[in-house]
Image (cartoon, helix red, strand yellow):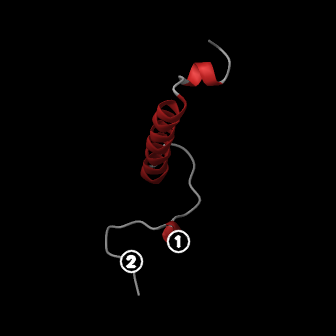
């Protein structure tokens, strides 16, 4: 079973460094996940992120 043409999977990625499309996709996905977790935490606790860590 081979991956669909044009679709990159983690198995066929070489070790690359720098601003590659693969790294930027994962960076964006993790940033979106962090943003959603931050908003959900604010909604559940009623405090902003800065208040939660004691800066306000």
Name which residue lies at 45% across and 68% down: 9
Q: Quadrant of the C terminus?
A: top right
Residue found farthest to the left: 5
The image's mark for residue 11 is 1
Q: Which residue is mark 2?
A: 3
User: Measured from the top left, where is residue 25 in percent x and y?
Assistant: 43, 49
Q: Front-most of 4 and 15? A: 4
Q: How many marks?
A: 2
Q: Are marks 2 and 1 in contact (CB under 8 Å)?
A: yes
Q: Front-most of 50 and 29? A: 50
Q: Quadrant of residue 6?
A: bottom left
Q: Quadrant of the N terminus?
A: bottom left
Left or right for 55, reference 6: right
The image's mark for residue 19 is none
Q: CA distance from mark 2 to mark 1?
A: 10 Å
- Decide: is 21 above or below 4: above
Name which residue lies at 59% across and 19% down: 50
Left or right for 27, reference 3: right
User: Measured from the top left, where is residue 43 in percent x and y?
Assistant: 47, 32
Name which residue lies at 44% across and 48% down: 29
Could you tell me which secondary element the residue under label 2 belongs to?
loop
Decide: few, some or many residues near mark 1? Use Cα within 10 Å; few <14, some 14-19, many ≥20. Answer: few
Could you tell me which secondary element the residue under label 1 belongs to?
helix
- Decide: is 5 above or below 53: below
Decide: few, some or many residues near mark 2? Use Cα within 10 Å; few <14, some 14-19, many ≥20. Answer: few
């Amino acid at each position: 079973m081979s991956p669909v043409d044009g679709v990159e999977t983690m198995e066929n990625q070489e070790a690359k460094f720098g601003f590659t499309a693969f790294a930027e996709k994962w960076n964006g996905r993790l940033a979106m996940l962090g943003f959603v977790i931050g908003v959900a935490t604010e909604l559940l606790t009623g405090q902003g992120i800065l208040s939660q860590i004691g800066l306000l």
